[in-house]
Image (cartoon, helix red, strand yellow):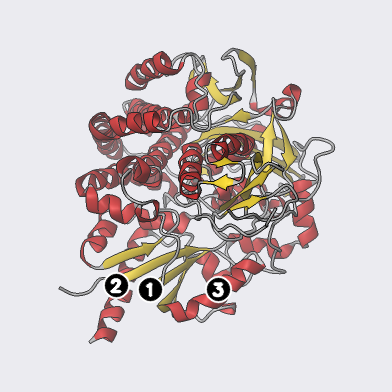
Amino acid sequence: MKRKATLAIQDLCACDGCEVAMADMGHVLLDLLDDKVDLVYAPLFMSARDYGEVDILMLTGVARTEEDIADLRQVRQRARYIVAFGSCATFGGIPGLANLHEQATLLETAYQNAPSLRTGEKTIPDELLSALTGEILPINAYVDVDFSLPGCPPPPRLLADFLERVLKQVTLKEK
Amino acid sequence: MRTEKINVASITRIEGKMNVSINLDEEGNVAQAQAQLLEFRGFEAFLCGHHASKALLITPRICGVCPVPHHLASVKALENGLGLEPPRPVAMLRELMLACEHVSDHLLHMFVLAGADLLLPDLPLAQRGLPTIYATYPQVLRQVVSMRNVTQTIISAFGVQAVHPNAAVPGGLNKGMTEAERQRFLKGVRQVKETLLKLCDELWFPRLRKAMQDYAGLGRLDTYFLALVSDDRMALYDGTVRIIDPGGSVAADFPAGAYLDHIGEKNINYSYAKAACLPSAGASDGMYRAGPMARVNAAGVAGTEQAGRLMEKFRSGFGQVAQETLAQHFARYISAVYAIERAEQILADPGITEWEPAAPAEYKAGEGVGIVEAPRGLLIHHFRWDDDGYIRAANIITPTNANAGAIDFSLKQVAVRSIRSGQVDREKLEHEVGIMIRAYDPCISCATHALSMEEDLFGINILDADGNLHRK
C-alpha cells in the first residue's frame, strides 16, 4: 500500500473560512483521509500541537504580528511543498485593507472611538501582546511558496481538484 | 517565589487563537484568570471609506465559520438606516440561510470541535480530533458530512458560496428559489432532521450526559443572558432583544436601534477582545452571556415541536434559567434542532418562491443597526454613512465579546480545581480549561474583528503575585 501524504494546515491571522471550505469538501475530504492523506496538524479540527516534517503545508491568513513573521521564517525546511491557501495568504486579502490606514487609527477606532465603549474604559490593550507588523504583505514576502491557491475561500470543488494535483506531485517525486 | 515560564498546551478546536494566563497570589493560589484573545484586524476602521453596500461583502470575512450572520446583520443595518423593509419571501429566505448556517456550524462543533471530547474521552488530549473521530466513528462522520452538505448547499443556492456568501442586497436578495429547489431542499432538510435526532438520541446525547457527570459544576457562574425573541419564542433573524437576569426574570425587551442604551463595552488590557457588558448592572455584575443557552433561557417557548420537547427536558434539569457552563452543549443541540425545524417550516411554504429583484437603494446620509442571532449568539452591526453612501463609522459587537467576561470568570473557577498552594496539576488544568472553553464555542476571529495579534496558539501562562511567569 502506498504511503499517505502528510498534510498540515497552519493558520496565521485568519477567519478560518479556508478550513471550513476544506470541511465543505465533505465526502471527498473523508475519501482522501481513507487512503491518500494523513492530516497531522490543523488547530481548528484537532488538538495536535505541532507537526514535524510534512509533505504539504497549507498556510492560511496573513502575518499580522511580528510573531507570525517569526513563525513563517521557520516553516520552509519542515515542508516539501508549501501552499499559500486562500486570498489572504496569496495577496493579503480583506485584512490587507488595514494597509489603507495608520496603525494608530486602527487601534483608536477599536479601543477609543467605538460608541459602545464606556467612559474611562479606553486604554489600548498592550499587556503581554505581540506587536503588529507595519503592513500586511502576501506570505511569499517571508517564505518561498510552491503553490498559491487564491479564493476567499477557494471553492470546495476547486480545492479538491487542487489537492488531487498536489498529491500526484508528491507521489511522482517519490518514484 | 521562583519564576519560570510555563508552557501548557495550545487550546485547540476553537475558532482562532487564545492564550490563558493565571495569576497566583502570595500563597500560590489562583488570584485571577485571564483569557487573552490574540488577534486584531481592524474591520471597524477599514470599513470606513467604503460604500455601505460593500459592507455586505467585507463583514462576512470577519469569520469563516459564521459568515452568514455577519452578511445579514450588515444588510439589516443598511435597511434600518435606509427605511427599507424587504418583502416577506425575502425575509423568510434570509432566515432559511441563517437557520442552515446554525445547523452547519453546530454540527461541526457538536461532532468535531467539542465532539472529540465527547466521543473520544479516553484518548489523550493531543490525539483528539477529526482524524481520530473519523477512524473510530467513520459512519457517524459520514452522516455529519451528509447533513452539512444539505445545509451548506442551501446557503450556496442563494449566496454563490456558503463561505463567504453574496446573497443579500438592501431590500432584497440577488437570487430567488425555484419550486424545484424548494421541494428538493425540503426533502433534504427533513432527512437532516431525522438523522440529527437519531444520532443524538443514540450516541451524542448519552455522551454529553456522561461528560456532564464527569465534569459536574465545571466553570459554573451566574450571569445575565441576551438573545433575540419573537413573541416569547426563540428567534434567529428578527425579533426584539431580551435581557434575562441571573434569576431568570425578564429585565428588559428592546429593539435593535436601542442597543447603546443597554449594552456597553470595555477594553481588556491583556486581550485584543473587548468585553461587552450591561452598564446599568455594573462591571462584573453586568456580565452577560450570549449563544444557544441564552436563546433557550430567553425564550418562553421554542416554537417548534422537537426543540420544544427538548427544551422541556432542559428546563426540568436546569430550571427556568440554566447557569451550568457545560449545559451550553445541551442548549446547542436544542438550537440545532430548532434551526432545522425552522428551515423545514420555511421550506414548507410555497410562497417563498415569489421573488423579484429589489430596486437599487438610494442613499442619503443615514445610520442603522442590524441584529441577528449568530450560532454563537447575539451579533450587532452598526453603521453610519454620508450623503453618497460612504461609511463614516462602524461598530460591531460579536457574541464572543459578550462571553469574554464570562469566560474569564469560568476560567478562574476551573483553575482553582487544579492549583493549590503553588502546586499545579498541569494535565488536569489543561484538560479542564479546554473542556470549559469549548462549551462557550468562542470565535476569536469574531471577537477580535477590531485587531489581530498572536502568540503561541493557546498557551497557558501562570503568573506569580509579581506578575512573573511561574512554572511548578
Disc 2 to disc 3, how far (Cα)? 22 Å
Tell whether label 2 touches label 1 (CB within 8 Å). Answer: yes
Work out whether residue B319 or residue B331 is closer to the camera in this orientation and state it: B319
Identify which amino acid the numbered label 1 is placed on.
Ile
Percent x, y for residue A156?
36, 59
SS at badge 2: strand
Percent x, y for residue A138?
58, 73
Residue B343 can be seen, yes or no: no
Q: Earlier in the sequence, mark 1 or mark 2?
A: 2
Q: Are marks 3 and 1 on the same chain?
A: yes
Query: Where is mark 1, residue-wise?
Result: A56
Work out whether residue B464 or residue A138 is closer to the camera in this orientation and state it: B464
Query: Where is mark 2, residue-wise?
Result: A5
| Residue B352 relative to residue B167: left or right | left
Percent x, y for residue B83?
66, 31
**Which residue is drawn at the image coordinates 57% and 48% (left, top)?**
B444
Badge 2: chain ID: A
Percent x, y for residue A105?
79, 56
How crowded pointer 2 is (Cα within 10 Å; few <14, some 14-19, many 20+) is rated as many
Tell whether label 3 touches label 2 (CB within 8 Å). Answer: no
**Which residue is drawn at the image coordinates 72% and 64% (left, top)?**
A100
Disc 1 to disc 2, how far (Cα)? 8 Å
Residue B77 can be seen, yes or no: yes
**Which quadrant holds residue A97?**
bottom right
| Residue B429 relative to residue B158: left or right | right
